[in-house]
Amino acid sequence: MPLIVSEIAVTEAASADFANVLKADPEIGSALADAAGKAEGRLFQGIFNARPVALLRVVADGDGWRLAEIVVHPATRGRGVGKEMLRQSGNLLAPASLDSGPRWSR
């Protein structure tokens, strides 16, 4: 199964849902909890075999985005999950090209 990356709300519940991913990196869990309190940035989840395996948060930086945190479950490290999270999240953040077809309005 491929890694499925999607955007989720930056909330304290997201931190709780990803407790297994965050237990190896408690400082990132604290940073996500702080970001949830401020509703800061955009959060992406990585799901593999119906289980959360990675989180990535970006924050606004000028006209673009800057990586704030990325965490991958210890059991899936070294398998390219982080690289794939960056690639798919970047695609979700990038503005659509002119020939990509109609866009959904917000």
Image (cartoon, rainbow, N blue to C red):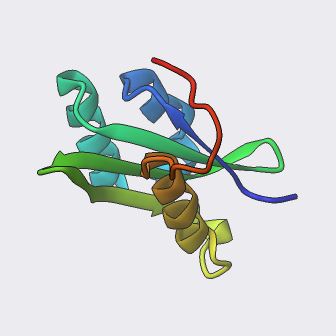
Whether residue 66 can be seen here: yes
User: If the image is split into quadrants, where does the N terminus sit?
Assistant: bottom right
Give the quarter of the image for residue 37: top left
Whether residue 24 can be seen here: no
Compared to residue 103, the image places residue 93 above or below, namely below
Name which residue lies at 83% across and 49% down: 49
Residue at the extreme left of the image, as rendered: 62
Compared to residue 83, the image places residue 56 above or below, namely above
Name which residue lies at 29% across and 59% down: 67
Image x and y of residue 104, in percent: 57, 24
User: If the image is split into quadrants, where does the C terminus sit?
Assistant: top left
Compared to residue 12, the image places residue 95 above or below, namely below
Image-based side of 45 in relation to 56, left or right? right
Residue at the extreme front of the image, as rendered: 99
Nearer to me, 70 or 6:
6
Image-based side of 75 in relation to 94, left or right? right
Image x and y of residue 103, in percent: 57, 31
Nearer to me, 90 or 44:
90
Name which residue lies at 62% across and 47% down: 100
Image-based side of 44 in relation to 28, left or right? right
Image-based side of 100 in relation to 68, left or right? right
Name which residue lies at 32% across and 57% down: 69
